[in-house]
Image (cartoon, rainbow, N blue to C red):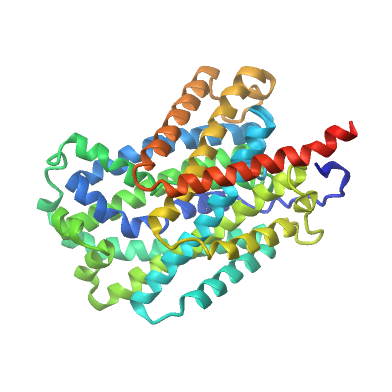
C-alpha cells in the first residue's frame, strides 16, 4: 500500500463551532423522511405513531452516546474509518468504510431522486440537468472550505425550521383533540412495528463526528452538539407529528401520499404548496451537503492511512479541505446517477453500510474501554466502562437486527453490497502484496 505518512500534508482547519455541530447533526437527521414517513406509520400504528416516534429515538440515543463518548476521547475526521481500524482491526475498518462508499453514492442518488420528485410537484423539471446542477453546486460549496459548508448548513436548517414553525403555528389552533386520542388503539405490537419506519427520521444525528479534526475544542464540543442535535430533532418531529395527526386524524394521514402537504393545506390553503415543497427541497439540499462532507472525510482518512491511494489524504494548502477526496467523491456521486431509481432499493443499499458503520463504532467503544484504559481516562464525556460496554453491545444488536429485517424487503441491495465487499477484499489483499514482497 502507499505510505501516506511520507507525503507532506497541510492541516485540516478547525472551523466548525458548537452551532455548526448541532446544525450538521440535526440538519442531517431532519430531512426528507418527515415529509413521507408519517403516512405509512399511521397505516401501521394509527395515532400510536406518536409513541413510535419516541421509541424510535431510543436506539439512536444509544448510537449518539457511543459516538459522543468516542469523540470525547479521540475526535478524528473520517472517524467511522479511524475508530474501527484502530480499535477493532485495520481490515474491519477498511471494509466498513469501503462499503460506505457504495452507501454514500446511494445516499446522494436517493436524495437527488427525492429532490426531483418534490420539485415536479410545483413546476416541470428536467431530471438529469437538475441533478447535475445541484450536485455540482454542493461539491463546489464544499471545495470552498468546511466553515463555508457549515455556515450553508446552518442557513438551510434555519429556512427548514422556519417552514416547520409556520406549519405548526398555523396548524396548532386547528388541531382536533379527538384525532389525538386512543394512542394505543392499534395495539402495542402495531406501535412496535412502526418503529423501524420511524428510525429513518434520526439517521445521521452523529454526523459531526466525521469532521472531528475540523471542530473547535472537539472533545467537548461534539458530545454537547450531539446531545443538543438529538433533542432538537426529537422536539421537531414530535411537534410536527402532533399537528399533522391532529389536523388530519389517523385515517386521512394513513391514506395520504403527501401527508404534510395535505395537512398544511388546512391552515395555509394555497400557500401550503410552496411552503411544504420549498421545505422539502431545502431539506434535501441540506442533507446532500452534510452527506458530501461525510463522504469526502472518510475517503480522506483512508488515503491518509494509506489503505486507499495516498493522494486522497492531501489537504488544500490554502482552503484546508481534502480537495482530492472531494473530487473522487464527486466522480463517484456522478456514477451513482446510473443506479436503479427505486427508492426501496436505494434506501436498503444505504441502510446496510450505515448499520455496519454504527456496529463498527460500537465495537470500537467496547474495545477502547477494555484495552486502552489510559485513553478512557482522558474522555471528556466520563462514562463508566460498564456503561460504555452495555451501550456498545446494545448498539451492535440493534444494528444487526435492522440489517436482517430489511432482507425481507429486497434481496438485490444485499447482493450488490456483498459484491462490492468482495471487490474491497480483493483490493485490500492485492494492495498489501507489494508491501509483503518488499519486506
Residue 202 in the image, given as x and y percentages of width and height? 41, 46
Q: Which quadrant is home to the C terminus?
A: top right
Q: Quadrant of residue 368?
A: top right
Is the residue 1 above or below the residue 9 in the image?
above
Residue 209 in the image, given as x and y percentages of width and height? 59, 43
Residue 402 in the image, given as x and y percentages of width and height? 40, 38
Q: Quadrant of residue 149?
A: bottom right
Q: Quick one: 3 or 140, which is closer to the camera?
A: 3
Q: Quick one: 219 or 59, which is closer to the camera?
A: 59
Residue 136 in the image, given as x and y percentages of width and height? 61, 70
The residue located at (59%, 29%) in the rendering is 364
Is the residue 251 above or below the residue 70 in the image?
below
The residue located at (66%, 46%) in the rendering is 216
The residue located at (21%, 62%) in the rendering is 256
From this viewpoint, is residue 321 visible? Answer: no
Q: Which quadrant is home to the N terminus?
A: top right
Is the residue 229 above or below the residue 401 in the image?
below
Amino acid at each position: 500500500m502507499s505510505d501516506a505518512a511520507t507525503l507532506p500534508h497541510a492541516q485540516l482547519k478547525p472551523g466548525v463551532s458548537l452551532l455548526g455541530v448541532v446544525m450538521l447533526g440535526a440538519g442531517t437527521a431532519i430531512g426528507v423522511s418527515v415529509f413521507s414517513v408519517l403516512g405509512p406509520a399511521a397505516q401501521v400504528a394509527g395515532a400510536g405513531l406518536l409513541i413510535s416516534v419516541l421509541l424510535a429515538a431510543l436506539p439512536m440515543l444509544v448510537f449518539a452516546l457511543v459516538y459522543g463518548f468516542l469523540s470525547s476521547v479521540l475526535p478524528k475526521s473520517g472517524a467511522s474509518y479511524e475508530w474501527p481500524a484502530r480499535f477493532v482491526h485495520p481490515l474491519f475498518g477498511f471494509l466498513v468504510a469501503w462499503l460506505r462508499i457504495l452507501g454514500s453514492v446511494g445516499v446522494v442518488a436517493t436524495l437527488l431522486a427525492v429532490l426531483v420528485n418534490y420539485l415536479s410537484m410545483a413546476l416541470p423539471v428536467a431530471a438529469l440537468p437538475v441533478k447535475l446542477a445541484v450536485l455540482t453546486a454542493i461539491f463546489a460549496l464544499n471545495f470552498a472550505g468546511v466553515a463555508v459548508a457549515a455556515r450553508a448548513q446552518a442557513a438551510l436548517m434555519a429556512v427548514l425550521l422556519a417552514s416547520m414553525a409556520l406549519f405548526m403555528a398555523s396548524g396548532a389552533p386547528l388541531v382536533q383533540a379527538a384525532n389525538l386520542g386512543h394512542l394505543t388503539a392499534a395495539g402495542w405490537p402495531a406501535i412496535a412495528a412502526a418503529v423501524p419506519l420511524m428510525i429513518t427520521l434520526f439517521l445521521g444525528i452523529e454526523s459531526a463526528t466525521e469532521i472531528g479534526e475540523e471542530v473547535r475544542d472537539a472533545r467537548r464540543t461534539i458530545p454537547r452538539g450531539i446531545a443538543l442535535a438529538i433533542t432538537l430533532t426529537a422536539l421537531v418531529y414530535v411537534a410536527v407529528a402532533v399537528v399533522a395527526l391532529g389536523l388530519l386524524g389517523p385515517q386521512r394521514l394513513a391514506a395520504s401520499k403527501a401527508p404534510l402537504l395535505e395537512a398544511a393545506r388546512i391552515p395555509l390553503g394555497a400557500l401550503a404548496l410552496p411552503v411544504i415543497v420549498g421545505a422539502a427541497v431545502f431539506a434535501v439540499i441540506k442533507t446532500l451537503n452534510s452527506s458530501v462532507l461525510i463522504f469526502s472525510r472518510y475517503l480522506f482518512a483512508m488515503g491518509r492511512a494509506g489503505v486507499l491511494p495516498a493522494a486522497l489524504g492531501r489537504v488544500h494548502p490554502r482552503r484546508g479541505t481534502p480537495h482530492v477526496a472531494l473530487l473522487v467523491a464527486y466522480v463517484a456521486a456522478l456514477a451513482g446517477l446510473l443506479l436503479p431509481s427505486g427508492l426501496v432499493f436505494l434506501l436498503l443499499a444505504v441502510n446496510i453500510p450505515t448499520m455496519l458503520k454504527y456496529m463498527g463504532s460500537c465495537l470500537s467503544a467496547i474495545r477502547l474501554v477494555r484495552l486502552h484504559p489510559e485513553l478512557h481516562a482522558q474522555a471528556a464525556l466520563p462514562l463508566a466502562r460498564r456503561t460504555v460496554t452495555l451501550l456498545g453491545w446494545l448498539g451492535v444488536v440493534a444494528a444487526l437486527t435492522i440489517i436482517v429485517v430489511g432482507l425481507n424487503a429486497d434481496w438485490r441491495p444485499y447482493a450488490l453490497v456483498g459484491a462490492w465487499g468482495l471487490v474491497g477484499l480483493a483490493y485490500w489483499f492485492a494492495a498489501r502484496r507489494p508491501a509483503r514482497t518488499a519486506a
